[in-house]
Amino acid sequence: MVNRRIKAALFLCLAMVLAVSCDTISKFLSARYPIHEIGLVRYSVTIPIAIFVAWSALRSAQIGLMNWRPLLLRGLLIATGNLLFMLAAATISLADGVAIYFTMPFFVAGIVPFILGEKVPLLRWFVIAVGFGGVLVMTRPGSTIFQPEALLALGCAFLYGLGQVLTRRVDQSLPTSVTSLWQSAVFTLFYAGFAFAFYALDLGEAGNKSLAFLTRAWSFPTPIDIGMMMLAGVLSSLQLPLVVYAYKHAEASFIAPFEYTAMIWAVMWGVIVFGDVPDQMTLIGAAIVIVAGLFMVRFDRSTPLP
C-alpha cells in the first residue's frame, strides 16, 4: 500500500515537469496567437495518442460510459482551470502563476471531507501549511504578484483541485488510459467551442495581455510555432495519464502537495526562456517546498491510511 502511494507521488512529480514545459510553450506563444488556437492544436494532438494508448481497453468495451457524468464534469473543471491559468500567465510570470496555483492543496484538503469522506490528519495539514509557507517566501505578498490577473490563477487552483478530487469518484477499475482519453476529448471540445465563439464574435485584440490572449484573432502559425503547439500536445499526452494514476491510487490530500515540485521547473524555464532570474528568497522558499514534500513521504511510510 505504501509503495503504491510513493509511486503515485513520483508519477505526479514527473507530470509536473511535463506540465510546466507545456505552460512555458503556451506562454511563449501567447503574444502571437490566441489561447483557443494554441489549446485546440495542442489538445487535438492528444486525441490520437490517447486512443492509441487506450486501444486495448477500448477493444474490450471499457469506454467509461457508466462514469460519463463525473468524467465530463472533471474534464470541464480542469479545462476551465487550465484556461484561467494560461490567461494569468500571459501577464504575470510563470513562477508567480505556479506559486498562486499552489493554494490548490488547501482547496483539496478542504473539499475531500465533504466529497470523499477522507480524514485529513493534523500533521498532514501542518506539512501542507509549511509547503505553502515556502510559496509565500518565494512570492512575498505585496509584490507585483498581486496583480488582478493573479486572481485567475487562484480560480485555476480551486477548479483544478475540485476536478482532481472528482477523479476519486470515477470507477477505480476504469483504466487510466480511458480516463485520460476522456480528458483529452473534453479539452479539445472545450477549446474548439471557444475558437468558434471568438471567431464568430470577432472582438479584436484588447490592450490587456491576458484579455488579448483570449480575444486575439486567429493567424496561421509558422512551421516552428505549430511544431511547438504540437510538441505541447505530445507532452500533455504523457502528462495526463500520470496525473490520473496519481490521484486514483493515493488520497487527494496526500498526493496534492507533490505538485509543489512544479515550482522548480517554473523557475528554471523562467530563467532560460523569459530571463526571470530568481533571487535568494525564491531559492529559500523552493527549498522549504521540497523539504515539506519529502517529509510527507517519510511521514506516510510509518503512518497507516487515514
Image (tube, helix red, strand yellow):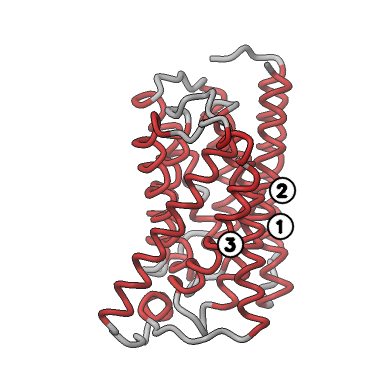
Going from the N terminus, do you reach mark 3 or mark 2 first? 3
Could you say where residue 54 lies in the image, as x and y percent from the top left?
Answer: 61, 41
Tell me the distance, in whole angstroms, between the alpha carbons under discs 2 and 1.
Answer: 6 Å
Residue 178 horizontal side relative to residue 212, left or right: right
Residue drawn 47% across and 25% down? 171
Label 1 vs label 3, nearer the camera: 3
Residue at the image position 61 percent from the left and 62 percent from the top: 233
Left or right of 264 on screen, residue 88: left
Depth order, front residue of 38/83: 38
Kind of residue sitting beneath label 1: Leu
Q: Which residue is mark 1?
A: 283
Say the numbered circle drawn on residue 287.
2
Q: Which is more toward the observer, 175 or 131?
A: 175
Is residue 208 in view? yes
Which is more N-terminal, label 3 or label 1?
Answer: 3
What residue is shown at x 46% (from left), y 52% (from top)?
Answer: 185
User: Where does the image place residue 205, in percent across and percent down from the top left?
Assistant: 36, 87
Q: What residue appears at the point 48 percent right and 86 percent down from the top-left corner?
A: 219
Crowding at mark 2 (Cα within 10 Å: few <14, some 14-19, many 20+):
some
Q: Compared with residue 137, is residue 226 higher up or lower down, i.e. above or below? A: below
Residue type beneath disc 2: Ala
Tag 2 near tag 1, CB within 8 Å: yes
**Quick one: quadrant of the N terminus?**
top right
> How far apart, in angstroms, are the residues tagged by discs 1 and 3?
35 Å
| Snapshot quadrant of residue 245 | top right
Q: Quadrant of residue 194?
A: bottom left
Q: Which mark is residue 45?
A: 3
